[in-house]
Amino acid sequence: MTTSNFSSYLKSRKADFLADNGEGWTVVMGNEAGDLDSLASALGYAWLRSNTSGKAIAYITTPKEDFALRAENLYALGLAGINHPFEELYCSGDPMPSQVSQFALVDHNVLHTRYASPTTRVVAVIDHHEDEGQYKDTPDPRIVEPAGSCSSLVARLYQSPSNLSIPPELSTLLLSAILIDTQGLKEGGKALDVDREAATFLLPHSLLAHNEEVSASSDNQPITHLPSVQFLSATLGEKKLSVSHLSTRDLLRRDYKEYAFSMPASDDATQSSKVIRVGLATVPLRLSAFFASSNYPVEEIQDWLAERDLSILGVLTTFRNKKGKGRREQLWIVKATKEGIAENLWRGLEVSDELELERLGFSKFVGKANVTDESEDEDAGEVTTDEAWFGESYVARAYKQGNASATRKQTAPILRRLMDLFTSDALYKDAQ
């Protein structure tokens, strides 16, 4: 199958799905952050399921207006001949047919409430995040296990004995997702054996296979030594970090996930007051550069909180210092009217052995629009006792993260446990 045929296949698949009003189809859905891993995993599993278990289509959760925020996604799609993704892919913003009742989840393991209904069934789960324990009976397969990339778990399904071949475009997309998620299968990094095995399987089936170096490669040598793999990994990494042109709002919505936690409702409570909404945005810049992304970054952050009706916003930064070492910082903004939330959040985060957080003073980055790097030693922490307000409505704290290997995949479960504890405590107190 040529890349043009693959593109045509996706376009016709989308047309058939909409013509059927979704009846009898399985919608394969990645997580709402819409990174390359979610995109590739959805396309990869949808192809597999279509050829083994009935009609399936990948649902790309990225809204049309947000595609430009992820240059690495557009680059990888371009390699696969998908140059007009809104025409070829079934995306957020396209209609969700009324007859859709079956979902397969990749790169997450809980269906968002907006798609849930009494007739909805989750028929497959493939994920590498913390298992939230749902859908124990209906999914086949149900795979929730550690991996550097969910795409590795999808690729492993193609390795099971069968006559089904994987299209080179899909192999390239899955390989690209693995490389970008594991920093090129870096030794000592996030890559596990399942990632290395998947990448080794995918490479000869990918569009890189025509390279003489790939075809002549020994099975005993790691693929990371191949110039074509190194080039693809480096290019994807550069595209991912190419965010200097994005505004504060763009950076917040580029890699964003949202969570909702139910609060006990008093008799006079409104529906919105029963729910605590929390957003987590991963930003590939240090905080000083993040606050230099717009002329009025604080106002744009406040606008995002209001737009999404958030009680809490966490900004999780990832960057490299001058020595090339990976570093992370965290910024948390809490709506001041939510009594007790901030104190519980600070306490839980600051005692986490997994995150190893150390307070940072806002004077290091807030209000320094021209500062994109720290003049002092980058590894020097600064402890502060001020609470640092975002105006009268919000309170915020910033931290240096000691454990630079802990990503949102580790932070989100910590947050979830803290919020579950807070809401259960509030329920107990409300019953007194």
Image: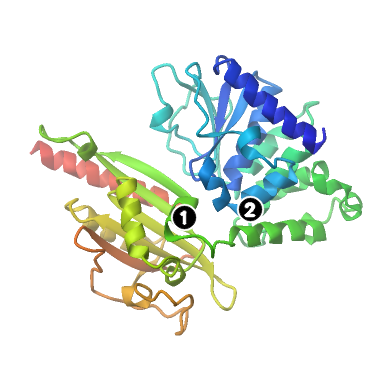
Q: Residue at x 23, y 68 (%)?
A: 387
In which quadrant is the C terminus drawn?
top left
Query: Residue 154, how many percent across, how many down?
Result: 65, 37
Query: Residue 423, how many percent across, how many down?
Result: 23, 42
Of badges 2 and 1, the one in the foreground is: 1
Looking at the image, residue 32 sits to the left or right of residue 342; the answer is right
Residue 274: quadrant of the picture? top left
Residue beneath disc 1: 250
Helix, strand or loop status at disc 2: helix
Task: Inspect this view and state whether residue 370 appears.
Answer: yes
Query: Residue 128, how many percent across, how many down?
Result: 54, 43
Query: Residue 89, how many percent across, how many down?
Result: 62, 34
What residue occupies the far left of the structure in this picture? 432
Q: CA distance from mark 2 to mark 1?
A: 15 Å
Helix, strand or loop status at disc 1: helix
Identify the disc placed on residue 72.
2
Q: Residue at x 59, y 62 (%)?
A: 242
Identify the disc placed on residue 80.
none
Label 1 neighbour load within 10 Å: few <14, some 14-19, many 20+? some
Q: How many callouts does the rendering have? A: 2
What residue occupies the far bottom of the structure in this picture? 376
Structure colour scheme: rainbow
Q: Is residue 345 above or below residue 4?
A: below
Amino acid type of disc 2? Glu
Q: Is residue 305 above or below residue 396?
A: above
Amino acid type of disc 1? Asp
